[in-house]
Image (cartoon, rainbow, N blue to C red):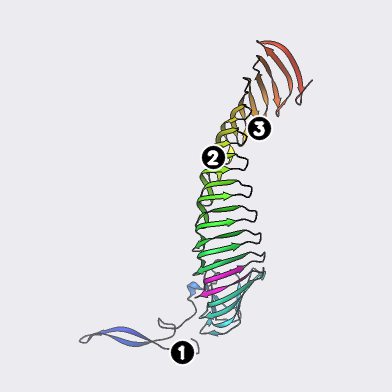
């Protein structure tokens, strides 16, 4: 018990034979249901609690006196420069929190009412962060301004300890992000203006991009499509300043499925992606009339490919890891047929030229040069 004894009037229902029931006044001793503020019960003390817990911490310089800690750090020591009454810190002073073996400190200056922060506070971290705003019953509540050591400034309201409502985040790089928070996480429509000149706008859900987004780059490129839980998902259209337009689906943030890519020079390429890389059968039509067709594996040509030339000529043979490798046959429109090996896209070894099935010439190649 403290040196202060306080009795509180309470009401109880009494009944007895012959008199029925009536309300009567009684006195509640300190610590009972009618008592004033007391230190928290054992179940909400900070000792032994995990990081981030909201709990009552015993002050290192005032044993037996407690203050509310809205974000406990295991092993931290907390001191208070003002008074303590009935086991709870009170008055206007400075709370100092030290943790991580003394490497990290935070000083908070303001008023405590029955152990909990109330009204306007300012705090400073050892890294140079300065934050100013109001508390209500130990939790941030109302407008706050947070200045980080790199020059970043974040400004907006809190409710019950969590960001709530419209915020503006100005980064030292020049990037500005504006949009609403809900229960501490980005929620709703946000606009992001990057220092590079890029602008992105779309919706967040529970702190992650979710829904339709439009991303405009300073170069003039525009990319548009949907996000799900922070990753591109579903159909996207990518328009580049060169005139190239690419359309197709994303899955888990990577191109996945059939894409059509129309290039500014008139070429068209289409085929499937898998996990962000070309994988499967592709057809590539070039502006000079050439048509190249064959399979990709993990983003590189692999296996049998056919190249059809606009004059009627045809070349076909194997690719390995994106390069011609192995025996190729090249048929010209005039009836000549060249046949021989490639190594890493260079003719290598003996090549034979035939016409009407009869050999008419041969040559030996070293690194693409005929000998």
Most foreground residue, 19 or 272: 272
- Residue 299 in the image: state x and y as whole percent: 61, 36
Q: Which mark is residue 76?
A: none
Q: Which residue is mark 3?
A: 322
Residue furthest right as drawn: 371
On the picture, is 102 further left or further right than 189? right
Q: Which residue is mark 1?
A: 5
**Magenta stretch: includes residue 143:** yes
Q: Secondary structure at mark 3?
A: loop
Residue located at (54% from left, 54% from top)? 201
Which of label 1 and label 2 is nearer to you? 2
Which of label 3 and label 1 is nearer to you? 3
Q: Quadrant of the C terminus?
A: top right
Position of residue 44 relative to residue 270, above or below, is below
Q: Secondary structure at mark 1?
A: loop
Specify the segment rendered in magenta.
125-146
Spatial CA distance of label 3 from label 2 is 24 Å
Q: Quadrant of residue 14?
A: bottom left
Q: Quadrant of residue 29?
A: bottom left
Residue located at (57% from left, 79% from top)? 110
Q: Which residue is mark 2?
A: 247
- Label 3 or label 1, whichever comes before in sequence order: 1
Spatial CA distance of label 3 from label 1 is 87 Å
Position of residue 366 relative to residue 133, above or below, is above
- Label 3 or label 2, whichever comes before in sequence order: 2
């Amino acid at each position: 018990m403290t040196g202060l004894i306080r009795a509180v009037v309470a009401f109880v229902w009494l009944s007895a034979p012959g008199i029925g029931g009536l309300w009567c006044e009684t006195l509640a001793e300190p610590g009972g249901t009618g008592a004033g503020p007391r230190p928290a019960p054992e179940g909400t003390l900070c000792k032994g609690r995990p990081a981030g817990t909201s709990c009552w911490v015993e002050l290192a310089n005032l044993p037996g006196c407690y203050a509310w800690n809205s974000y406990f750090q295991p092993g931290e020591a907390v001191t208070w420069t003002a008074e303590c009454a009935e086991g709870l810190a009170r008055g206007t002073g400075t709370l100092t929190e030290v943790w991580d073996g003394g490497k990290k400190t935070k000083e908070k200056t303001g008023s405590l009412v029955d152990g909990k922060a109330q009204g306007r506070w300012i705090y400073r971290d050892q890294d140079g962060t300065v934050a100013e705003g109001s508390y209500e019953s130990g939790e941030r509540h109302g407008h706050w301004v947070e200045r980080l050591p790199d020059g970043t400034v974040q400004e907006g309201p809190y409710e019950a300890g969590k960001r709530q409502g419209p915020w503006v985040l100005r980064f030292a790089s020049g990037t500005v992000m504006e949009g609403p928070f809900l229960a501490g996480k980005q929620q709703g429509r946000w606009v992001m203006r990057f220092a590079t000149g890029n602008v992105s706008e779309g919706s967040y859900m529970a702190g992650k991009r979710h829904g339709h987004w439009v991303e405009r780059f300073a170069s003039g490129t525009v990319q548009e499509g949907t996000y799900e839980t922070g990753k591109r998902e579903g159909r996207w259209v990518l328009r580049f300043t060169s005139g190239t337009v690419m359309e197709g689906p994303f899955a888990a943030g990577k191109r996945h499925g059939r894409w059509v890519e129309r290039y500014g020079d008139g070429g068209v390429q289409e085929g499937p992606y898998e996990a962000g890389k070309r994988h499967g059968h592709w057809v590539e039509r070039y502006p000079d009339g050439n048509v190249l067709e064959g399979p990709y594996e993990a983003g590189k040509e692999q296996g049998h490919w056919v190249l059809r030339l606009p004059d009627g000529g045809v070349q076909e043979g194997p690719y390995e890891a994106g390069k011609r490798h192995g025996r190729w046959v090249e048929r010209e429109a005039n009836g000549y047929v060249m046949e021989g090996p490639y190594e890493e896209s260079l003719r290598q070894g003996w090549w034979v030229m035939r016409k009407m099935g009869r050999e008419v010439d041969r040559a030996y190649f070293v690194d693409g040069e005929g000998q």
